[in-house]
Image (cartoon, grey):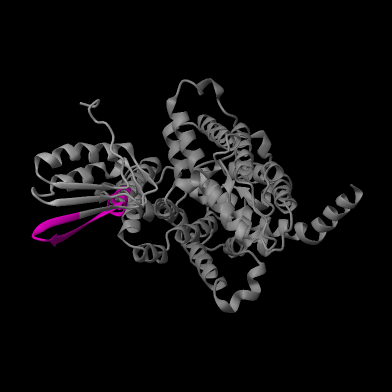
């Protein structure tokens, strides 16, 4: 036991402590930025990161995974807060989402993510990226009013909205915010160039935040018109824990929207988490595999804790997990350490956090949104063929026109249509020949013929002409659905009336008299 404790202590000091510090520097601006994009109190993003580090990491079986607020949930969270009308009621939806994940994990249903086509998931993330970018543009140019662009995505482009937004831009934008955003985006681009590989140890989001703070300090020092207003800076109370909102349990069973939003958030958070787990496991040099169902239990408990303590929902996050792997993290103590650093930052240096410009956070989120919906993604899906691109495109369009749940549902239906269409084509084929002046047909059944082929097979049989010969060969089938056997048996009676010479190979007829 002592040897094991000594091993973990040495591993923590040598690997997990510096890795945890690196992840903390990546996570801090993202926690604030994602809370901003979600329309939630900024402290709720920090609390979510703290819970992800201190609670989820201890329950999870992932060695490198790091949980916290995720950009992929911002659209759904923002819409839910607006529709429910009260952040305290929204927290109930977060608890429902956590309960949903906990039940999935306990029932060992983690494989559910495997049943979502990749084209629909990519479309969902791309749509989230588009909405994320659109929501950050006003903040990036200095707009400090919280009610900006609270309407649906499509209403942004109505003549009335465009003219109103243009007037707002002229009234509220500042050159300082625009300049900080431009510099931040330029820094992001430069740090991704090959010549900046040596600077990779410094997280780009941290560099952007530091530049924003220094730039605004300089503007204020020289009393420039570029100086930012108070509404354009992060505002976190000195005592975060005194201002925490708690869920209003009196509304739990009186508002069905709470449960609907909770299930939507839980499903999306589950998908994001399982996709992240798969990605981060590939980065583990020790080839350790995260137990999926245990991860869902951890995420469920984490989100129930988030809802209880006034935080926005969390998921496992690829950016944080990748930062952990890059920094040399070895065990889950790295994720725990990052949560500890977040807690210390909130307790000890809230005044420093309040010097961060919103424009810096908006720049971080603009890059995050771009990464979700980059042009290369559209190009790759297009190359995959129309059966991948059509569900992908429809998912994006419907999400932008309605909401995420409807968009994903319709994307799934379109994908299922193509699956059924492929099934129709794949499970049998018909060939035609002429022997001794008689038209002969061969219907070759493939490995598995299900009821999905029922309509098309019946139509094919009805088109066989009179006075011909037909062979239906099922000798190589592993499975023939009873519905298919029924159709073939029914056709046997019709074939005699139409003088069709029917031969069955490897197919056993069934009694259809009971059906009629």
Q: Residue furthest right?
A: 2
Position of 382 relative to 466 (above/below): below
Residue in front for this viewpoint, 101 or 370: 101
Counting every numbered tag in the picture gives 0
Q: Which quadrant: the C terminus?
A: top left
The percent coordinates of residue 346 (x first, y second) are: 69, 46
Q: Is residue 30 magenta?
A: no
Residue in front for this viewpoint, 244 or 411: 411
The percent coordinates of residue 68 (x first, y second) are: 61, 47
Q: Residue furthest bottom?
A: 195
Q: Is residue 431 magenta?
A: yes
Residue in front for this viewpoint, 226 or 447: 447
Residue at image point 53% right, 20% down: 250
Residue 304 picture quarter: top right
Left or right, 18 with respect to 474, comes to right
Residue at image point 46% right, 34% down: 261
Left or right, 216 with respect to 486, comes to right
Position of 130 relative to 221 (above/below): above
Q: Residue furthest front?
A: 436
Q: Is residue 420 visible?
A: yes
The percent coordinates of residue 296 (x first, y second) are: 59, 41
Left or right, 9 with respect to 60, comes to right
- What range of the chain is rendered magenta? 420-441
Q: Is residue 164 visible?
A: no
The percent coordinates of residue 57 (x first, y second) are: 69, 46
Residue 212 picture quarter: bottom right
């Amino acid at each position: 036991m002592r040897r094991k404790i000594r091993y973990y202590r040495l591993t923590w000091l040598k690997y997990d402590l510096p890795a945890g510090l690196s992840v903390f520097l990546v996570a801090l601006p993202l926690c604030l930025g994602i809370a901003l994009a979600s329309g939630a109190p900024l402290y709720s993003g920090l609390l979510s990161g703290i819970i992800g580090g201190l609670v989820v990491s201890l329950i999870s079986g992932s060695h490198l995974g790091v949980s916290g607020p995720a950009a992929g949930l911002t659209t759904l969270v923002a819409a839910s807060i607006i529709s429910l009308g009260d952040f305290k009621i929204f927290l109930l939806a977060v608890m429902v989402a956590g309960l949903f994940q906990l039940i999935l994990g306990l029932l060992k249903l983690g494989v559910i993510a495997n049943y979502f086509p990749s084209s629909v998931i990519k479309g969902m993330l791309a749509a989230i990226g588009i909405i994320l970018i659109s929501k950050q543009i006003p903040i990036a140019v200095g707009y400090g009013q919280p009610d900006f662009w609270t309407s649906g995505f499509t209403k942004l482009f109505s003549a009335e909205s465009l003219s109103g937004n243009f007037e707002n831009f002229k009234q509220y934008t500042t050159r300082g915010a625009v300049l900080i955003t431009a510099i931040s985006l330029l820094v992001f681009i430069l740090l991704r160039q090959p010549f900046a590989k040596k600077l990779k140890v410094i997280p780009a989001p941290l560099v952007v935040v530091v530049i924003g703070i220094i730039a605004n300090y300089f503007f204020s020092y020289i009393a420039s018109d570029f100086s930012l207003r108070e509404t354009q800076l992060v505002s976190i109370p000195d005592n975060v824990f005194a201002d925490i909102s708690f869920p209003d349990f009196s509304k739990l069973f009186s508002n069905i929207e709470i449960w609907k939003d909770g299930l939507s958030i839980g499903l999306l958070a589950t998908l994001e988490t399982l996709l992240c787990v798969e990605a981060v496991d590939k980065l583990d040099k020790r080839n350790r595999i995260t137990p999926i169902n245990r991860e869902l239990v951890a995420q469920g408990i984490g989100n129930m804790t988030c809802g209880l303590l006034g935080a926005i929902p969390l998921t496992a996050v690829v950016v944080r997990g990748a930062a952990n792997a890059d920094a040399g993290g070895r065990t889950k103590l790295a994720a725990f350490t990052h949560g500890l650093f977040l807690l210390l930052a909130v307790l000890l240096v809230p005044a420093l956090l309040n010097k961060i410009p919103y424009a810096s956070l908006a720049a971080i989120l603009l890059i995050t949104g771009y990464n979700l919906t980059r042009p290369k993604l559209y190009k790759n899906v297009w190359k995959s063929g129309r059966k991948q691109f059509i569900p992908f495109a429809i998912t994006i369009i419907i999400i932008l026109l309605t909401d995420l749940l409807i968009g994903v549902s319709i994307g799934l239906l379109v994908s299922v249509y193509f699956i059924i269409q492929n099934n129709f084509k794949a499970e049998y084929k018909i060939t035609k020949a002429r022997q001794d002046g008689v038209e002969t047909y061969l219907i070759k059944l493939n490995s598995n013929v299900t009821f999905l082929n029922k309509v098309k097979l019946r139509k094919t049989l009805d088109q066989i002409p009179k006075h011909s010969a037909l062979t239906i060969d099922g000798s190589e089938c592993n499975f023939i659905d009873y519905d298919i056997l029924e159709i073939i048996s029914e056709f046997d009676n019709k074939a005699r009336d139409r003088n069709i010479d029917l031969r069955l190979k490897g197919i056993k007829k069934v009694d259809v008299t009971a059906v009629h």
